[in-house]
Structures are given as structure tokens and as C-alpha cells.
């Protein structure tokens, strides 16, 4: 205790006629007000912008993840199967051709199973176009042999194709390469576009937070000045703003993220409820079953956290840069 | 402690406000800074507090050349200097208690550790009844006392006070002067800018008189 505080309080009493306040009352616990007042920051507009950004970002990321998963699914499905097609040719016994094709394919290493697509199945496949009750033998319908291949050790497709065309009239090998490549390109383009869109949205969020922070600093300039005068470090001042912006970011990101999860769940339910519907089928083909799943929730949770942190860090850095210039102007005058 | 060598100040392209100032603020010294209104007292205090850069000359604070100080050095220097502004600069949204505790709060101290010190000081300046009041409802004198308490709370090595008794009645002014003298006895250098002659007559102290931008010192 410094000496100055030991001076006689009776002698120094200010004669103001009021009842003295008890020590107990004076020394009670008090909660501190925030140094930067909450209402001095234009918060609600910022929360709204962040919520919208988080919503769109969640949807974009979900779409990217779904397309990626689905593309990987196709790849493994298609890579595990090739098809041998045997076209009927006049004067050639197609059943015999199918048998020899089957034998040729079967002796290649890397082939795990060979099965001829049964006539009933072919009929089923053609039903939408030809109706039921037609005679397969009367029509020039190619027969199909489905070949399951090892993914790790695929057979020599070139040799297989060569031998087939050479020895079996009307036979050809389709390893779906062209399809696969086209699907992959499409999926990859979608993913790249999605990530670009995501990056743009994050950039817009950062800029919005920068402007909001600068506005808040301009509005609280007198507070920043006083903080400087009482010896506050830059990090402390930045922390006072960061606190508010972390909260705003969290609020906005949470609202947007939760809305996105609801929207995804809703969409998923719609797709599942309309499986027969061709437009839903298309959606399913491209996006899979559209299930959000645990990964989706965890991912959205991480996104919410990420956006909140992004908001806080952006405002911190903005204060850091800007506080310097404020101080400078106070110094130069 | 603080040393000025041929320091001059002008704002923008106007005329010199201060010229050829050379003096020392010695450790544990007590001085009045006086001069007519507009003589540059506030400007000089801002120079001492490093919130204004001189146009010419050299200022040394606690052994360090002010020019060589970076942004990150300033808080450390300012923590060793207490300042009372002519216009108080209290934060309106904080209570008096919080305003006075602010320097300790920004240093990251635990509130429980300094609560009694803050309350004692507020009692000392006669603001015990006003502990939880907000500055806008206070009288000028009350604000002034709160500003003084804030400057003193961390026992600075140098106290700079700009018209600290301007809004006070003579008896309260005397009381606060005693507080400054007492503070000075514990080793703090005190610089009080004032044009209150009565106040200066109460104690014998060095007088730095500003006139036409120049300074004369009477011991
Ligand atoms: N920021 C500024 N920009 C331009 N001129 C300024 C600025 N601050 C002060 N001045 C000028 O510098 C001169 C000295 O001002 P200063 O405030 O230092 O005087 P003072 O001695 O404190 O006066 P008072 O006794 O009225 O408080 C005045 O002429 C004033 O107009
Ligand atoms: Mg002044």
C-alpha cells in the first residue's frame, strides 16, 4: 500500500452531508462492462451477411463432397466391370459365338467372373422401348457378356479386344473407358467450380468483416485513444474488438449452417420420396442419395467453426493494421 | 527522466507554438507549467506523453530517444506516465470504478487484486458515493477527480496533469494539490499545467512559464 493511501480519512473527508457508503458495499463484486460497447458495432447486418454466406458455403461444400463421392463410386463400379457385346450376324450361330467369346475372356488373368446376361434380363432391359412379349431371336439384338475384373490387376484389354474381334465375328469389348473419362471430367469440373465459388464466398465474408471492423473502430475512436493513453497494447485493443466479432461470426455461421443442414435433409427426403420421378432420378444419378449423414453434420460444424474463426481473426488483423494508423495520426497531428 | 533539447513544435504550416525548449524533468521533482491560454501548455504535455511528435529537437524519455521508439514500445512507456487531460477523456459507458481501474485492467491484472486500491483512491478523491455512476451524469469537478484517480491508480513515475483543478472549488483544489505533493514525496515526478496563481502560491516549486513559445524557468 503506498503512503498516500494512509492519509487520515477523517481529516480529508469532503463535507457533503451525505451518509458515508459502507466498505462492504464499496468492495462488493461488480461485473465489468465491455470496453468496446456491444451496441457500438453494427452487428445485426453483419450476422445476416455471415449467415447467408455460411448457408451458401455449406450447400456448396456439400455439393462438392457429394459429387466427389458419387464420382468415386462410379469409378469403382465401372472399373470392376467390362462388357463384351456380340452382335448377331447372318449365317453365324449367335449362341456359339457367345460361348467362344466367353471362353476367350475367361482365360485372361485378372478376370474374376464371366456371366452371360440372360435372355430374360435382356428382354427386361429392352421392355421400355419394345414392350413385352417380343421374341428376342427375331430381332437383331446383341447379346451381352458381363465380365468382372480385378481392380488391382486388370486384364490386358488391348489383347482381349484383339483376340475377340479376330476369333468371334461380331464381338467387341467395351471397358467403359470413354464413359468413365467423361464422367470424371464432369465431376472434376463441378468440384473445381464448387471450390472456386466457396473461395469467393469466403473472400466476400472477409471483406465484409474488414469493413464492419473498420466501421466499429471509427465509431469507437475515442475509446481506442483512451486505451492507448492508459498503456494498452495493440493486442489488447484488438482483443476487445475480436471478442465481439467472434460472437457475431459464431451467431451468423451457426444460423446459416443449421439452415443449410435443414435444407439438405429436406432435399434428401424429397429425392427419396420421389425415386420414380425422372427428375429426382437425375438428381440421384449425379448427387447420389443426397444423404447428409454424420460426415455432413461434422463438416457443417467445422465450417461454422471455421467461419467464426475467420471472422474473429479478420477483425483482429484489421484492428492491428488500423490501430497503427490511428496512433500515427495522433502522433503526427 | 525526461529531457528536451532545442525542441520546437508547429502545427501544419502555422507559426511555431513552441520554440527552443531545453529542460529536464528530474526524478521526484515537482513543477508547475504555466502561461497564458494558448501558450502551448497542452502541447507541451502531449510532447512529454509522446502523443505529439516535435517538429524539431530531441526528446529523451526514461533514457530512450523518442525518435527511436516503435509502436510496440509506446505502451510500456505510457504505463510509467500518468496523465490527466484537460477534457478528462473518461469513457462514458463505463462506471467511475471501471474508468479508474482501466489502466490496471488493460495490464491484465486480476480485479480482486486491485479492488481495494481503486476504492481507496476513489474515497480519497471524495467520490465514494459515485463509484457506480457513469461519467455523463457527473459534475465537471467529479469528472476531473475521476480523471486524476485514473492517472494515479498505477503509481506512475511521472504525473502530467492539465489544469487538474480547473473545475474545483479552492478547498478541493488544495486537497488535490496535497495529494500531488504526497505522491511526489513517494518519488513521482509531477508536472501540473495551470494558470491558477493561488494554487501555485501554496507550495514552493519550480515554475516553467511559457510565453510566446519560449520557456522561462523559475526555481
Ligand atoms: N491539433 C492542433 N492543430 C492545430 N493547432 C493546434 C492544435 N492544438 C493546439 N493548437 C494551437 O496551438 C496553440 C497552443 O495550444 P495549447 O492547447 O497547447 O495551449 P494551452 O496553453 O494548453 O492553452 P489553454 O490554457 O487554453 O489550455 C494554440 O494556438 C492552439 O490553437
Ligand atoms: Mg491546454
Image (tube, rainbow, N blue to C red):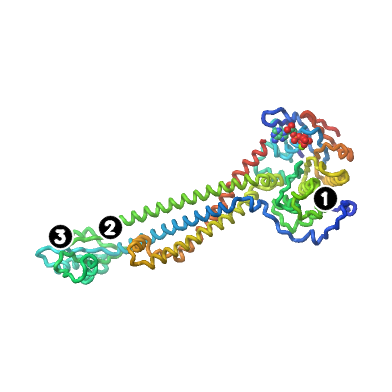
Q: At 21% from the left edge and 59% from the top edge, which residue is drawn? A: A159
| Image point (77%, 43%), residue name | B84
**Would you name the residue on which mark 1 appears?**
B125
Name the residue beneath numbered marker 2.
Answer: A177
Q: Position of residue B123 (x, y in %)?
A: 82, 53
User: Is there any visible trace of residue B120 in the rendered image?
Assistant: no
Q: Residues within 10 Å of mark 3 (few under 14, many from 20)?
A: few
Tell me if mark 2 has few (under 14), some (14-19) or many (20+) residues whose alpha carbon lies within 10 angstroms of its own. Answer: few
Judging from the image, what secondary structure is the residue with disc 2 in?
helix
Query: Which residue corresponds to mark 3?
Result: A166
The Cα–Cα distance between marks 3 and 1, rounded to whole angstroms, is: 109 Å
Question: Where's the N terminus of chain B, which quadrant?
Answer: top right
Identify the mark nearer the N-term, 3 or 2.
Answer: 3
Residue at 82% in and 45% down: B187
- Which of labels 1 and 2 is toward the front? 1
Q: What x and y, as percent, mark residue A119?
A: 20, 71
Q: Secondary structure at mark 1?
A: loop
Q: Nearer the viewer, mark 3 or mark 1?
A: 1
In this picture, residue A258 sits left or right of residue B4: left
Within the displayed image, which quadrant is ligand 1 positioned in? top right
Which chain does tag 2 point to? A
Is residue A188 at least partly visible in the picture?
yes
Which element type, helix, strand or loop, lies under badge 3?
Answer: helix
Read off the chain for label 3: A
Marks 3 and 2 sit apart, C-alpha to C-alpha, by: 21 Å
Amino acid at each position: 500500500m503506498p503512503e498516500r493511501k494512509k492519509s487520515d480519512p477523517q481529516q480529508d473527508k469532503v463535507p457533503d452531508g451525505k451518509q458515508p457508503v459502507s466498505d462492504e458495499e464499496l468492495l462488493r463484486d461488480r461485473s465489468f462492462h465491455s470496453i468496446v460497447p456491444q451496441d457500438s458495432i453494427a452487428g445485426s447486418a453483419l450476422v445476416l451477411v455471415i449467415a447467408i454466406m455460411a448457408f451458401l458455403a455449406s450447400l456448396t461444400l456439400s455439393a462438392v463432397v457429394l459429387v466427389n463421392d458419387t464420382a468415386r463410386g462410379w469409378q469403382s463400379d465401372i472399373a470392376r466391370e467390362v462388357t463384351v457385346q456380340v452382335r448377331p450376324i447372318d449365317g453365324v450361330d449367335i449362341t456359339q459365338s457367345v460361348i467362344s467369346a466367353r471362353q476367350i475372356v475367361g482365360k485372361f488373368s485378372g478376370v474374376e467372373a464371366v456371366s452371360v446376361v440372360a435372355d430374360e434380363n435382356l428382354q427386361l432391359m429392352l421392355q421400355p422401348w419394345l414392350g413385352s412379349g417380343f421374341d428376342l431371336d427375331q430381332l437383331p439384338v446383341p447379346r451381352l457378356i458381363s465380365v468382372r475384373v480385378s481392380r488391382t490387376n486388370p486384364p490386358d484389354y488391348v489383347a482381349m479386344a484383339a483376340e475377340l474381334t479376330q476369333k468371334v465375328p461380331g464381338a467387341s469389348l467395351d471397358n467403359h473407358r470413354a464413359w468413365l473419362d467423361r464422367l470424371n471430367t464432369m465431376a472434376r469440373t463441378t468440384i473445381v467450380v464448387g471450390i472456386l465459388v466457396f473461395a469467393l464466398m469466403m473472400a466476400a465474408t472477409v471483406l465484409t468483416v474488414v469493413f464492419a471492423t473498420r466501421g466499429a473502430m471509427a465509431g469507437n475512436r475515442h475509446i481506442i485513444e483512451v486505451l492507448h493513453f492508459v498503456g494498452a497494447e495493440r493486442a489488447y485493443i484488438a482483443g476487445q474488438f475480436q471478442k465481439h466479432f467472434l460472437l457475431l461470426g459464431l451467431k451468423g455461421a451457426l444460423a446459416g449452417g443449421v439452415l443449410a443442414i435443414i435444407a439438405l435433409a429436406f432435399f434428401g427426403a424429397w429425392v427419396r420420396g420421389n425415386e420414380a420421378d425422372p427428375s429426382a432420378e437425375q438428381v440421384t444419378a449425379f448427387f447420389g442419395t443426397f444423404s447428409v449423414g454424420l460426415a455432413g453434420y461434422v463438416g457443417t460444424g467445422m465450417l461454422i467453426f471455421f467461419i467464426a474463426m475467420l471472422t474473429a481473426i479478420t477483425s483482429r488483423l484489421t484492428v492491428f493494421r488500423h490501430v497503427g494508423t490511428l496512433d500515427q495520426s495522433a502522433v503526427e497531428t | 527522466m525526461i529531457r528536451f533539447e532545442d525542441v520546437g513544435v508547429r502545427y501544419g504550416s502555422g507559426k511555431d507554438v513552441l520554440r527552443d525548449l531545453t529542460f529536464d524533468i528530474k526524478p521526484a521533482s515537482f513543477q508547475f507549467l504555466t502561461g497564458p491560454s494558448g501558450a502551448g501548455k497542452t502541447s507541451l504535455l502531449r510532447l512529454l506523453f509522446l502523443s505529439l511528435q516535435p517538429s524539431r529537437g530531441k526528446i529523451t524519455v526514461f533514457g530512450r530517444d523518442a525518435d527511436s521508439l516503435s509502436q510496440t514500445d509506446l505502451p510500456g512507456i505510457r504505463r510509467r506516465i500518468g496523465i490527466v487531460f484537460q477534457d478528462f477523456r473518461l469513457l462514458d459507458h463505463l462506471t467511475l470504478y471501471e474508468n479508474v481501474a482501466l489502466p490496471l485492467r488493460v495490464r491484465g491484472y486480476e480485479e480482486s487484486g486491485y479492488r481495494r486500491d481503486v476504492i481507496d483512491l476513489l474515497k480519497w478523491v471524495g467520490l465514494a458515493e459515485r463509484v457506480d455512476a457513469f461519467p455523463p451524469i457527473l459534475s465537471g469537478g467529479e469528472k476531473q477527480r475521476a480523471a486524476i484517480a485514473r492517472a494515479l491508480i498505477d503509481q506512475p513515475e511521472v504525473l502530467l496533469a492539465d489544469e487538474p483543478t480547473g473545475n474545483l472549488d479552492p478547498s478541493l483544489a488544495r486537497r488535490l494539490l496535497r495529494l500531488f505533493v504526497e505522491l511526489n514525496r513517494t518519488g513521482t515526478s509531477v508536472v501540473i499545467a495551470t494558470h491558477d496563481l493561488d494554487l501555485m502560491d501554496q507550495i514552493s516549486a519550480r515554475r516553467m512559464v511559457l510565453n510566446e513559445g519560449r520557456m522561462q524557468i523559475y526555481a
